[in-house]
């Protein structure tokens, strides 16, 4: 297939991908949050090997988009922050998965890298 | 599953994802380039609905990483730029697909968003 052939603008393989969800750290964060009722900030930081500042920044983006909720509280006498995925966040993660499956299908249809 | 349970740092769902390849525009660009022997700059720009400056920037990142080659030439009397995926680029795209499949498996194991 050459560049003059069958691909049209509507076929852009990443047109349905939302960068809020697709970004590497946020995709990981949503994936972990989606597996639990809530996850603690420090746990996310350790799991994903992030600085507190970097994690906070990504949490803010997801919270502003309505994809996660941030819950402040205490555990014993220590202040704690938890994040919890919202219904919209769960849906956004599953939409991302659907877009990724379509992209994977397209890459695999193009053939094996070793041939 | 709560935040104190089975997830460990080594389990970060996106730890194997390379941001050079994963970024939305570059992932699309590599996917299209992987389907042809070479693709023309303007064709990529139209397919992905990008400004020339934005596309150039992403092409530079992929070229510097050795994932694509940039070929300058003419078609008729017009100057043209083509990009071509390298063997390393093809491999990187397939590595990304493998990482995405593992992530998808993990999201799907966590259950349906509507339940």
Image: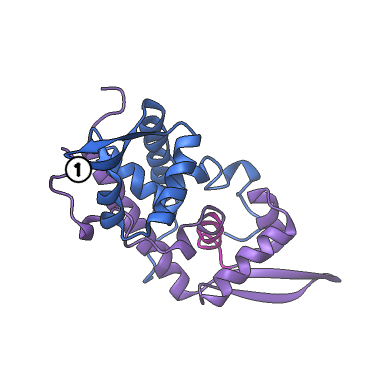
Chain colours: A blue, B purple
Please give the count of numbered marks on the rendered protein.
1
- Judging depth in this view, the residue of A78 and A71 nearest the camera is A78
> Dot 1 corresponds to which residue?
B3
In the shown orientation, is residue A82 left or right of residue A75?
A: right
Overall secondary structure of the magenta section: helix
Residue B33 visible in the current orientation? yes
Which of the image's four quarters has the C terminus of chain B? top left
Q: Residue A32, position in %: x, y? A: 28, 44
User: Within the magenta stretch, is there residue B100?
Assistant: no
Which of the image's four quarters has the N terminus of chain B? top left
Q: Residue B21, position in %: x, y? A: 47, 62
Q: Chain of mark 1?
A: B
- Judging depth in this view, the residue of A5 and B8 nearest the camera is B8
State the SS at label 1. loop
* Residue depicted at 55% across the width and 69% down the height: B62
Magenta range: B28-37
């Amino acid at each position: 297939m050459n560049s003059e052939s069958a691909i049209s603008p509507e076929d852009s393989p990443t047109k349905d991908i939302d960068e809020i969800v697709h970004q590497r750290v946020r995709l990981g964060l949503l994936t972990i949050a989606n597996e639990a009722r809530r996850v603690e900030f420090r746990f996310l930081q350790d799991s994903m090997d992030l600085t507190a500042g970097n994690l906070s920044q990504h949490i803010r983006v997801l919270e502003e988009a309505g994809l996660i909720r941030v819950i402040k509280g205490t555990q014993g006498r220590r202040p704690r922050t938890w994040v919890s995925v919202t219904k919209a966040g769960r849906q956004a993660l599953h939409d991302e998965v659907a877009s990724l499956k379509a992209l994977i299908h397209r890459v695999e249809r193009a053939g094996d890298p070793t041939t």
